[in-house]
Amino acid sequence: MNREEGQTVAERIRARFDDLTRAERQLANTILENYPVSGLGSITTVAEASGVSTPTVARMAKKLGFGGFPDLQGALRGELEATISSPISKHDRWAENAPDTHILNRFADVVMDNMRQSLRNIGTETFDSVARLLTDPDRTIHTVGGRISRSLADYFYTHMQVIRGGVTLVAPNSNTWPHYVLNMKPGDVLVAFDVRRYEHDIIRLAEMATGRGVDVVLFTDQWGSPAAKYAKHAFRARIEAPSAWDSSAVTLFLLEALIAAVQNAMWSETHTRMKDLEELFDQTKLFRKFV
Amino acid sequence: MNREEGQTVAERIRARFDDLTRAERQLANTILENYPVSGLGSITTVAEASGVSTPTVARMAKKLGFGGFPDLQGALRGELEATISSPISKHDRWAENAPDTHILNRFADVVMDNMRQSLRNIGTETFDSVARLLTDPDRTIHTVGGRISRSLADYFYTHMQVIRGGVTLVAPNSNTWPHYVLNMKPGDVLVAFDVRRYEHDIIRLAEMATGRGVDVVLFTDQWGSPAAKYAKHAFRARIEAPSAWDSSAVTLFLLEALIAAVQNAMWSETHTRMKDLEELFDQTKLFRKFV
DNA sequence: CTGGATGTGAAGAAATATTTTCAAAATGGG
DNA sequence: CCCATTTTGAAAATATTTCTTCACATCCAG
């Protein structure tokens, strides 16, 4: 029984297929089609699905060298996990000259994973709703970030400013926030960033804004800032990183996608603004074109 | 309970995520990672894998509208079967409810691609050399960004400031830059960000800095800013995006990986600084701990 | 007709899930 | 910072499901 240790269930079945009896082969075939999901139900389910009796299933499990049906099932689960959890990313040898353990590669793996998982958890309805909010020219956009996420708010602000008018960056110093709140009117949008460790002031700000009829859009992490309570829409991005810090890469990606969506939706206005901006830059000669 | 009939487990979790408590969210996240395989073991296994107790698992199953844990598990199995047996699995099933043409998915595809290609073109030697430069406590770090990349410089600055002393953020207004140059001494490092459209002032700054014996590290795009001429090390990240704008996501990723590397290399110093910082935060009560 | 394979049903055993209680911990408000 | 409230986990008792095994009837191929 020891040689069988490293084998998959499918391999074991094929290896001993000739020893199997008629009903057992029938069962084996059912397990092999739609492998390995079909073997995951209860022993009764599996038996019924293949049209054999439960004792047959139990018998075969032992015949294949497992302790019993649950043992076989555990093996199947393990295989499935291994299959699903290692997608192309691991095999994809980018930066081939680097050993897998180099921080650059480890970081890349984790970020790609964050990306995949975040995307799975973010509904396009949320995304589209937020894009629609931000496209509405009657709503003023306010944006604010915490100690770390401030840079993201800043990034967002810089872009939105070009795309449309009516965008405000709330200053980092929370003492001044009441003044900003004073300027928010019902229907305005507050785009807030708050990742752990969640900042009390941001939560309060979200609360105050909500109280004034402002729609709060929150960018946070997978655990969700308490500010989510006040948020009309929340994006929960995974921020896992092999580091003492969290990764904002996925959040930035979401932000950029959102910026792209808004820009598409209001292209005519944006186009004009960008052209005007170009001219202004040319006039002040602050920037010289190279490309 | 009837409206929930057609929903996937993931959807149910997302829909009620705000109602979930801390431990439940923890559990929910574990189920969502490696979805849906992670939810297929026994209730004990699942509980242990997420670090919560079995009652919590049972409680959440009911909260989500299932009869109990086995019911939830059955739903997961059903989904898995549907997913695996149909050929949908072609396109990694992120954001599965979104058509491939949704901007969110298009953006994701492009960014993942940028990531792969950038990594292939970036040698770990460059990465390691830069990490070594930034780790040297005798060198002061100056960092500067352009109109858009300013946020990245800011992000970098915020983190480096915690990791080590001797970090300066060069103000955005280029009029004041000569003053900053005055303070740069030979052996210092200037971390500059310059993506298209390349900014004349940044190039001049890099030139001036090099003239004073400063090592310039440049983050730029795949075409390379003219400032690369003066840079000792340059990171060329792909910034392609289905948008009128470029994507900074890969650049941010590189930056974070670099920050992680530096932080690892000087952990003892960083550790002390972080603890001190915590205390200062506690004292000023600016931030309240949630996690 | 015969022997092995199979299914049925059932009973006991084992594992698993549910629920309860209660103390400890976390959270949120003042 | 403290207190009230909620959440959580451990333990245990209970309920339920699932698995194993057995006895026995049936089927089928040779």
Image (cartoon, coloured by chain):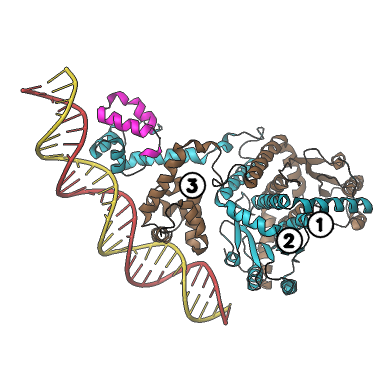
Chain colours: A cyan, B brown, C red, D yellow
Location of mark 1 (residue): B169
Q: Which residues are magenta?
A: A9-38
In this picture, is B38 found above or below B64?
above
Are the residues under badges 1 and 3 in a single subunit?
yes
Amino acid beneath label 1: Leu
* Mark 3–mark 2 distance (CA, rounded to whole Å): 39 Å
Q: Position of residue B1 (x, y in %)?
A: 41, 60
Neighbour class for label 1 at 10 Å: few (<14), some, many (≥20)? many
* Mark 1–mark 3 distance (CA, rounded to whole Å): 43 Å
> Which quadrant of the view contains residue B62?
bottom left
> What chain is tagged by disc 1?
B
Q: Are marks 2 and 1 in contact (CB under 8 Å)?
A: no
In this picture, is C11 found above or below A55?
below
Q: Residue at x 32, y 44 (%)?
A: A42
* Mark 2–mark 1 distance (CA, rounded to whole Å): 35 Å
Location of mark 2 (residue): A137
Neighbour class for label 3 at 10 Å: few (<14), some, many (≥20)? many
